[in-house]
Image (cartoon, rainbow, N blue to C red):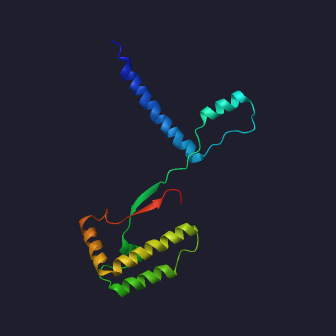
Amino acid sequence: PPYPSPKSHNLTFSTTCSASKWADRLIADFQFLADSSDNSSSSSITTATLIPPQLAPPDRHVSIPIDFYRVLGAELHFLGDGIRRAYEARVSKPPQYGFSDDALISRRQILQAACETLTNPSSRRDYNHGISEDQLGTVLTQVPWDK
């Protein structure tokens, strides 16, 4: 017996819709441009209907868990001055090669956040409690996908 046409139509439509959304995202990511050298009116109409309007690429981030003690090279038993010394040691020796200015700035911001969190007794207590409760979900940082 043949299947009812509405179900098969809906399935095809959702697949097409999903594929279309994926294609639109790819086109937006690669920023394909229309060919302006062809002045034929029928070609330009066809081109205009095939290429979606330029949209700003979405802000994409990856969440990464951060262990502030490891970031600083510090131990759990370090006091505030030990945390500061670990911070100063890391900040004074940035990587020399292979990192963009944005990456180096982000590195410094993460080091600073780690130092500020671990030198403040109440935030350190909260941080340590969070680590003991949920080791992977305590501190997540949003890293830009395209940098």
Against 107, is 35 above or below? above
State the image coordinates of residue 106 (x, y, percent, origin top left).
49, 69
Residue 73 visible from this viewpoint: no
Q: Residue at point 33% right, 80% down?
A: 120
* Nearer to us in this view, 83 or 16: 16
Q: Would you identify the image quadrant in which residue 51 lies?
A: top right
State the image coordinates of residue 109 (x, y, percent, origin top left).
46, 72
Left-right relation of 131 to 89 = left
Q: Residue at point 41% right, 23% down?
A: 9
Left-right relation of 147 to 4 = right
User: Where is the N terminus found, in terms of image quarters?
Assistant: top left
State the image coordinates of residue 91 (x, y, percent, origin top left).
49, 79
State the image coordinates of residue 22 (x, y, percent, origin top left).
49, 39
Q: Residue at point 45% right, 35% down?
A: 18
* Nearer to us in this view, 90 or 9: 9
Q: Most extreme residue toward the top, as rendered?
A: 1
Against 47, is 4 above or below? above
Q: Most extreme residue toward the bottom, as rendered?
A: 81
Left-right relation of 142 to 50 = left
Q: Would you identify the image quadrant in which residue 40 lies?
A: top right
Residue 14 visible from this viewpoint: yes
Q: Residue at point 27% right, 64% down?
A: 134
Against 75, is 4 above or below? above
Counting labels gives 0
